[in-house]
Image (tube, grey):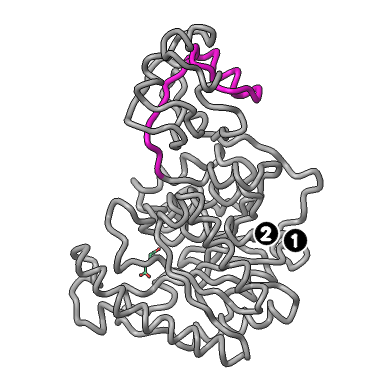
């Protein structure tokens, strides 16, 4: 899946993408392995150094939103659960409930030590998939930032069930970056960035410094899981980059190892930087970042060409309709080669879509007895993937 490459008119040097001028709001995500040592105890000094970095950003005029993992890891130790609390969903949910209160206390104290108010928001996938709830969460984030608070977010793991959860905080952070209208997102990780191959096994492996087109790196996460290099972790980060870039957000994967990880990255720019796309409206970026779709429309090559030219999807180009969806639900548009090309909100429900697929628009009224929309997906409700 190759995202269209739309470069900004005046590309910024890589480090400047994360500076206050380009990113008045910065989202920073920290992984569990950075915050929690293998024995299940908090790396308090490390967390304190990150809190100091956040305070420094604030003094430089930059707002920071923190997405912090670690609830399950912390809670599993406190409750004495095996396998880091991840042997069952019930264990993970119990561990998260216990660990989140520790995590919230930690950040409140460490960020508070700099005279800043930490504010916790626990969110679920549904809070971002539903447009109304998304706008509600976005409004809360905006208000917190306006009040000078440092929002600290995590998934509400203790109630999120398997099929309706993000599961990883990388993609959650990308959605948060969209909602907070952030200019940049930094994924602090235990790896220093995206590598062409597993650096532990392949001496020729090199760090990918700049990514302008996700097509260039799409294969790397796939091959990496086989080699053990990137695992699901890197795939989630690339997906996070896709979601964030669509909203014009620059993304970095950088090493979080060692104290003052944020200040170090901001000074060095070392890591993998995904340069942002430009030109998508906020609503379209939200649509592109959705994770759940209710159905799929298979289309012919002519329809793909029309969509690439910026036109609506007409019934005539639809060859098959899959899934059960209502009018207004998100559906993926699949090209003749089986590759998803676009995502949009359906103008018809699945039964109507099946009845009019492949038919000319002027036949639609006769088939359905009504023709509320000429397009299967209107171009205003559609994004290319
Ligand atoms: N939300 C999970 C936690 O707090 C972490 C998810 C992740 O590893 O990205 O433990």
Left-right relation of 95 to 358: left
Q: Residue at x 65, y 25 (%)?
A: 310
Establish if 227 lies above or below 312.
below
Residue 183's disc number: 2
Residue 128's disc number: none
Mark before the other along the chain sequence, 1 or 2: 1
Disc 1 and disc 2: Cα gap in Å?
Answer: 6 Å
Label 1: how many residues lie within 10 Å, few (<14), some (14-19) or many (20+)?
Answer: some
In this view, the residue in front, 269 or 200, is 269
Left-right relation of 275 to 156: right
In this view, the residue in front, 136 or 180, is 136
Left-right relation of 319 to 213: left
Q: Residue at x 51, y 74 (%)?
A: 152
Residue 22's disc number: 1
Label 2: how many residues lie within 10 Å, few (<14), some (14-19) or many (20+)?
Answer: many
Q: Is residue 106 magenta?
A: no
Pointers 1 and 2 in contact (C-beta within 8 Å)? yes
- Whether disc 2's CB lies below 8 Å from ligand 1 is answered no
Q: Secondary structure at mark 2?
A: loop
User: What x and y, as percent, mark residue 93?
Assistant: 26, 69
Q: Secondary structure at mark 1?
A: loop
User: What x and y, as percent, mark residue 149?
Assistant: 61, 79
Establish if 86 lies above or below 53.
above
> Which span of residues is magenta-colored?
292-317
User: What x and y, as percent, mark residue 299?
Assistant: 46, 18
Outermost residue toward the front in this view? 369
């Amino acid at each position: 899946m190759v995202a269209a490459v739309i470069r900004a008119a005046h590309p910024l040097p890589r480090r400047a993408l994360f500076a206050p001028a380009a990113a008045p709001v910065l989202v920073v995500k920290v992984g569990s392995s950075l915050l929690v040592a293998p024995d299940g105890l908090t790396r308090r000094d490390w967390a304190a150094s990150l809190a100091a970095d956040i305070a420094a950003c604030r003094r430089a005029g930059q707002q920071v939103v923190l997405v912090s993992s670690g609830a399950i890891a912390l809670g599993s130790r406190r409750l004495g659960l095996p396998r880091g609390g991840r042997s069952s969903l019930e264990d993970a949910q119990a561990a998260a409930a216990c660990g989140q209160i520790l995590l919230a206390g930690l950040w409140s104290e460490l960020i508070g030590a700099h005279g800043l108010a930490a504010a916790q928001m626990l969110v679920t996938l549904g809070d971002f998939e539903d447009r109304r709830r998304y706008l509600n969460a976005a409004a809360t984030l905006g208000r917190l930032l306006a009040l000078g608070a440092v929002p600290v977010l995590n998934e509400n793991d203790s109630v999120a069930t398997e099929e309706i959860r993000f599961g990883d905080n990388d993609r959650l952070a990308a959605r948060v970056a969209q909602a907070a209208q952030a200019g940049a997102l930094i994924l602090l990780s235990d790896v220093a960035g995206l590598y062409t191959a597993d650096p532990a096994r392949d001496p020729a492996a090199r760090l990918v410094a700049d990514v302008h087109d996700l097509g260039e790196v799409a294969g790397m996460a796939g091959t990496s899981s086989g080699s053990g290099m990137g695992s699901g972790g890197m795939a989630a980060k690339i997906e996070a980059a896709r979601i964030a870039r669509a909203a014009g957000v620059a993304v970095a994967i950088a090493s979080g190892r060692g104290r003052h990880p944020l200040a170090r990255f901001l000074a060095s720019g070392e890591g993998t930087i995904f340069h942002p796309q430009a030109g998508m409206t906020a609503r379209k970026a939200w649509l592109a970042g959705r994770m759940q779709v209710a159905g799929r429309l298979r289309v012919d090559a002519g329809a793909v060409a029309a969509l690439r030219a910026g036109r609506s999807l007409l019934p005539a180009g639809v060859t098959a309709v899959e899934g059960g969806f209502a009018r207004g639900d998100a559906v993926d548009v699949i090209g003749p080669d089986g590759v998803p090309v676009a995502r949009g909100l359906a103008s018809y429900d699945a039964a109507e879509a099946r009845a009019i697929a492949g038919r000319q628009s002027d036949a639609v009224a006769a088939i359905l007895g009504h023709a509320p929309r000429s397009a299967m997906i209107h171009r205003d409700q559609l994004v290319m993937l």
